[in-house]
Amino acid sequence: MGKVPLLCYFLLIALLFVNVSKADADEEIGVYELKKGDFSVKITNYGATVLSVILPDRNGKLDDVVLGYESIEGYKNDSTYFGGLIGRVANRIGGAHFTLNGIIYMLPANNGKNTLHGGTKGFSDVIWTVKSYKKDSHITFTYNSFDGEQGFPGDLSVTVTYMFIGTNKLAIKMVAKPLTKATPVNLASHTYWNLAGHNSGDILSHNIQIFGSHITPVNDELIPTGEIFPIHGTPYDFLQPRSIGSKLNDLPDGYDINYVLDSTSSVHFKKVAVVHESKSGRKMELWTNQIGVQFYTSNMLDNVEGKGGYVYSKYGALCLETQGFPDSVNHPNFPSQIVNPGEIYENVMVYRFTAH
């Protein structure tokens, strides 16, 4: 009596994986360009990934200012998350589990005993569907995440749009709608920036200003402790612009921390950071509607072969990932990232690029 249901169970699991694999196989992987004058962005529907961003410097010289691989194959075997759209939950979930509405959800442990960037096959490793594309304005991708994918509850409809605003702004709009169950959602764009050019060396001389006066400290596994800590007088203080490398002696492992963004009750859309690279004159400003931003100085890059055979090393780029607080599912004092059916999650980023 027990053997037949058990056999049926394994057959159903096998069929599920066949169907998922078939769905992936049916989708074609493409590369799409958005272009306006000298400003161009290339994106693939594999992981809704940013492949390149080409910008002029103060003299009009064009450079690709994001790190990446020479071909799509590199992204399929990637452990850096170059340019990927991260989900269902970006950053780390401690202990690879959480409890929601009295149910314990177990997730893949792909970062020690913790879950990182959505699990072993997060949104940066699936093939998205192109919904709308116009070369001089935007591209929209969609993905339907199924109930139980990477252990997360409920069906989730996800949309991401990359769009130009005016002549020098790039916006990324990430939207998710739970269809059947409450679920945590924390999407992020994991683009690696080097404003001198992807193949120019480290970013330690880049000047950065981050508009966050608190951080969420982490333990030695990079899991938040649950505290919200003021940065004044610490190496994390970038309230005034300074070079990324200026206090690295006090922080030999580099930066990989969530900043609590400053805001007022009357301003929902807030300025996140300003990054300036003096040799090229390029400046990048970032705004968001989110409450946090992960500042990461690519501390774990270790001789990764990228575009044109260039080898990326530690501190080869910086990431600014707007997000909810990491591991919020396990910290009741953090703002909740749980989204219920009928509610809409939205993460908007706007970059403004100039060169002087």
Image (cartoon, grey):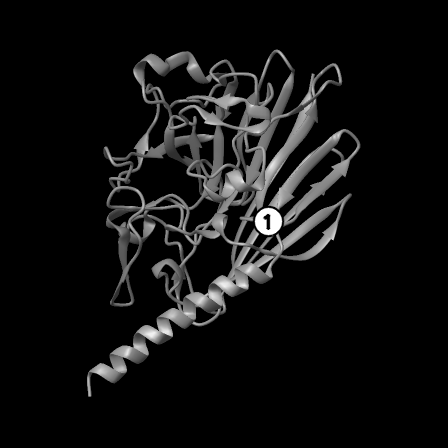
- Callout 1 secondary element: strand
Whole-percent x, y for residue 108 in the image: 31, 53
In this rendering, the count of numbered labels is 1
User: Hey, what amino acid is under mark 1?
Assistant: Lys
Q: Quadrant of the C terminus?
A: top right
Instruction: Name the side, left or right, on which 215 lies relative to 345.
Output: left
In the depicted view, which residue is nearer to us: 297 or 260? 297
Whole-percent x, y for residue 45 in the image: 60, 50
Quarter of the figure with residue 302: top left
Q: Can the viewer see residue 166 in this picture?
A: no
**Residue ranking furthest to the bottom:** 1
In the depicted view, which residue is nearer to us: 13 or 222? 13
Residue depicted at x 27% and y 57%: 98
Q: Can the viewer see residue 5 in this picture?
A: yes
Q: Quadrant of the N terminus?
A: bottom left
Is residue 80 depicted above or below 141 in this figure?
above
Whole-percent x, y for residue 262 in the image: 45, 35
**Residue ranking furthest to the left:** 2
* Dot 1 crowding, Cα within 10 Å, few <14, some 14–19, many 20+: some
Quarter of the figure with residue 299: top left
Q: Which residue is mark 1?
A: 173
Whole-percent x, y for residue 173 in the image: 59, 49
Is residue 198 depicted above or below 6 in this figure?
above
